[in-house]
Amino acid sequence: MSSENAAFYYDLAPSSMTSFSDKYICTFEICQNNTSFDSSWGFLKHLFDIHRIAVNNVEDVLPFLQEYIDYYKCKGIDSFEGEITILGAGPAGNDLILRNELHKEKLDKLLHRQEEERIETKARQCLFCKKVFTNKRSYVRHMYIEHSFNIGAPDNIVLFDDFMSLLKKKLDENYVELKKEINLNDEQEILSEKETWEDWWDNSKEAQTLSLFGQRYFDTPFDAIMEVKDEFKFDIKEFVIAKGLDVYERIKLINYIRRKTSELSCITCNTKFKNSDTLKDHYCNTNHIFLLEKDNFVSSEFLYPILADDPLLWYVDELFGDC
Ligand SMILES: [Zn+2]
Ligand SMILES: [Zn+2]
Ligand SMILES: [Zn+2]
């Protein structure tokens, strides 16, 4: 294979090839799997300089560059003395099918990851201050409201932590025109330009929150917490502060109560009831709600959400004050 006009790595500016999860390994025998690269540009340069391999229309394969090169490596392609091999330069056919398949695979993986990230609970510190947030929505919202830093609708960002560490790196490097500098791969930036975080927030029905001790739904997690105070005279915020609960203990508390409510049993004495009305009567006729102790929900099993998407977990910081 040869071509006069193939797009080689040096046709691309290194900065135009920023990708979030850049980590490439050269698997060719002479490199013995121990030559690694932090950027696709570095990897491509190595392939060209050492292995005399170039890639036609290289931009198209960047999202799955590692898999693409590995495929050809397994097919037995290797360096020829001095001669340059250009992948994908022949007549359209198998290479195009390969590119399409790898593209689809990558997209499936990202969509799957996006689903996982939507329900993931993980502590993250604000890029600008010391506050810690357990859900990426409250995290993004905080940076938007407190620091006027808008990165778009959090649910639409895949590989969120890679994205944030890239942002942090860019901030550290003191890039002024941050947004222009970051070249997001198509799959990674599903969010359209027009959709701002505010639009997302306004349109979001996702903050609909199931009552902690009943079966009603509320428009926001804040309303759900108010219900507990109004109906059950239980001030969770006061409880959280009095017990000095940290982020993880707050999460456990919410999940513990959710578990008990779903089992129709009392959070303190464990008595099981026939329906939520009789359970509510029990809470109103005893002081069991107020006898709740940390020991009840200390087990790490309660770190896992009982509800797939629980707005109370997104806002543990805003709902109960700083940790
Ligand atoms: Zn190599
Ligand atoms: Zn902050
Ligand atoms: Zn009880």
Image (cartoon, helix red, strand yellow):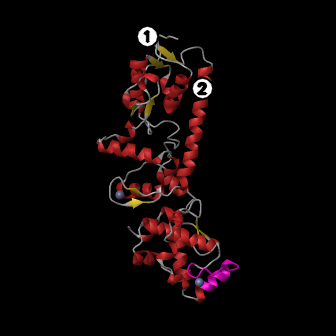
Q: Bin the neighbour count of mark 1 within 10 Å (Cα to Cα): few under 14, some 14-19, many 20 and up.
A: few
> Which amino acid type corresponds to the residue marked 1 in the rendered image?
Glu
Image quarter (top left, top right, bottom left or bottom right) of the C terminus: bottom left
Q: Which residues are magenta?
A: 267-282
**Quarter location, residue 243:** bottom left
Query: Going 55% across and 62% down the picture, which residue do you hit?
Result: 305
Reply yes or no: does residue 269 show up in magenta.
yes
Horizontal side, residue 49 vs residue 102: left or right:
left
**Quarter location, residue 285:** bottom right
Mark identifier at residue 98? 2
> Which amino acid type corresponds to the residue marked 2 in the rendered image?
Leu
Is the residue 115 above or below the residue 292 in the image?
above
Q: Say which of marks 1 and 2 sits in front.
A: 1
Residue 17, horizontal then vertical, whole percent:
42, 31
Query: Mark 2: which secondary structure?
Result: helix
Horizontal side, residue 43 vs residue 200: left or right:
left
